[in-house]
Image (spheres, helix red, strand yellow):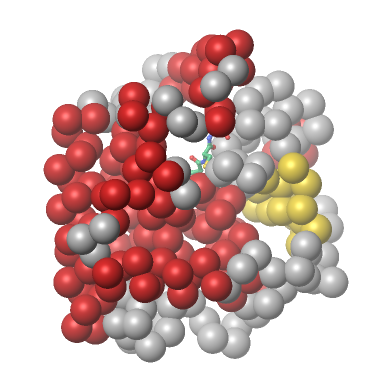
Amino acid sequence: MSGIVLHQYAESPFSEKVRSILGYKGVSYQSVEIPMIMPRPDTIPLTGGYRKTPVMQIGADVYCDTAIICRVIDEIYPENTIYPEEHLGMINTVAHWTDTFLFKVSVAIAFQPKAAATNPLFQDESAMSAFMADRAEFSKGSSELLGMPFETAEPHFIGHLNQLDQQLSVGGPFLFGDKPSIADFSTYHNVWFIYTQEALRDYFSPFEHLVAWYEKMVSFGHGNV
Ligand SMILES: N[C@@H](CCC(=O)N[C@@H](CS)C(=O)NCC(=O)O)C(=O)O
């Protein structure tokens, strides 16, 4: 057992990013399922007020934000590093852009009306209003978190899927060559967020290389929980 405790919830894309890295590295760890919305009376005292998901705890050390969580996991398990020195600048740039801009795009795609009709989260009206109220409170006062209109997001999303597919068709099996890097895991959680919703799977039909890559990423699993 690694001593790692991951505080997360099943539906969280950023948690999936970390679960997938733990799977790739074959790590044994403990998982704490936290509520999808506030209040989180057990987690907030641990983080000192930080409310994003996931959070990683190792003994008395608490790591907030997957940018640091993934680095720490890679330092503890350096075999098959996901931060290879060659291309590191590009890999970090792609991962950052993907976790920020592309994630905003993915949120708009994931919560479009077509998806909301079949998403289990939105089948219960009171659960849906509680979720919406929670996320409105979360983004209050932050221009960074303001939602992107679906009409703006969709061409960005399809255009990027196309770029990924082309890249993978000539340079795969992973985005920067033979082994997955942090750029793959950042991309993976965005794709997972959409692909796992049946109503949205058609987006991927034209992109066979991307789907083959996604299946490889899924096959890493989530480690030993
Ligand atoms: N930069 C953060 C982003 C994390 C993030 O936005 N997580 C989403 C869930 S996937 C979140 O915190 N949503 C609000 C919440 O869970 O309270 C990271 O890389 O960890």
Q: Residue at x 20, y 56 (%)?
A: 160
Say left or right for 190 vs 59.
left
Is residue 59 placed above or below 132 in the rendered structure?
A: below
Between 188 and 56, which is closer to the camera in this rendering? Answer: 188
Quadrant holding the N terminus? bottom right
Is residue 207 visible to us here? yes
Is residue 90 placed above or below 5 in the rendered structure?
A: below
Q: Residue at x 29, y 49 (%)?
A: 202
Q: Residue at x 45, y 65 (%)?
A: 185
Is residue 92 visible to us here? no
Between 130 and 186, which is closer to the camera in this rendering? Answer: 130
Q: Position of residue 216 (x, y in %)?
A: 46, 74
Q: Position of residue 77 (x, y in %)?
A: 65, 79
Q: Quadrant of residue 90?
A: bottom left
Between 133 and 74, which is closer to the camera in this rendering? Answer: 133
Quadrant holding the C terminus? bottom right
